[in-house]
Amino acid sequence: MSFNIEIIGFLAATLTTTSFVPQVFRIWKTKEVKDISFMMYLSMFFGVSLWFYYGFLINSISMMIANIVSALLVLVILFFKKSYSKKE
């Protein structure tokens, strides 16, 4: 039973985590960040960091992997926002 639950967790984690990938590629390709909210992504970073910690506390591998990858993708977006904002 718990194996099936973990599969659902991995599927949900994959879908939500990969939702950041199109934004990363769009910013990387266009170098346009004026419509990207820094505070929204900063808040998201702290949120997924806390979800990672929660996953650690309850020993949920899917939750930890999804949220560390999400945090890294959000950090890339924040880096792009800071880097490319200076050029606009």
Image (cartoon, helix red, strand yellow):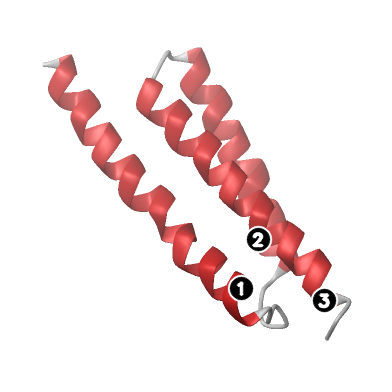
In this view, the residue in front, 31 or 8, is 31
Amino acid on which the number 3 mark rests in the picture: Ser
Which element is circle 3 on? helix
Label 3–label 1 contact, CB within 8 A: no
Which element is circle 2 on? helix
**Residue 28, x across and y down, in percent:** 61, 70
Q: Is residue 76 left or right of residue 48?
A: right
Residue at position x 20%, y 30% in the image = 7
Amino acid on which the number 1 mark rests in the picture: Ile
Image height of 65 relative to 86, above or below: above
* Residue count near mark 1 (Cα–Cα under 10 Å), binned few <14, some 14–19, many ≥20: some
Residue at position x 59%, y 43% in the image = 71
**Residue 74, x across and y down, in percent:** 61, 53
Label 2–label 3 contact, CB within 8 A: no
Residue highlighted by disc 1 = 27
For marks 2 and 3 on the same chain, the one whose residue lies earlier in the sequence: 2
Instruction: Quarter of the image for the N terminus: give it.
Output: top left
* Residue count near mark 3 (Cα–Cα under 10 Å), binned few <14, some 14–19, many ≥20: some
**CA–CA distance between discs 2 and 3?**
12 Å
Residue highlighted by disc 2 = 77
**CA–CA distance between discs 2 and 1?**
8 Å
Which element is circle 1 on? helix
Residue highlighted by disc 3 = 85
Image height of 48 relative to 1, above or below: below
Residue at position x 45%, y 30% in the image = 65
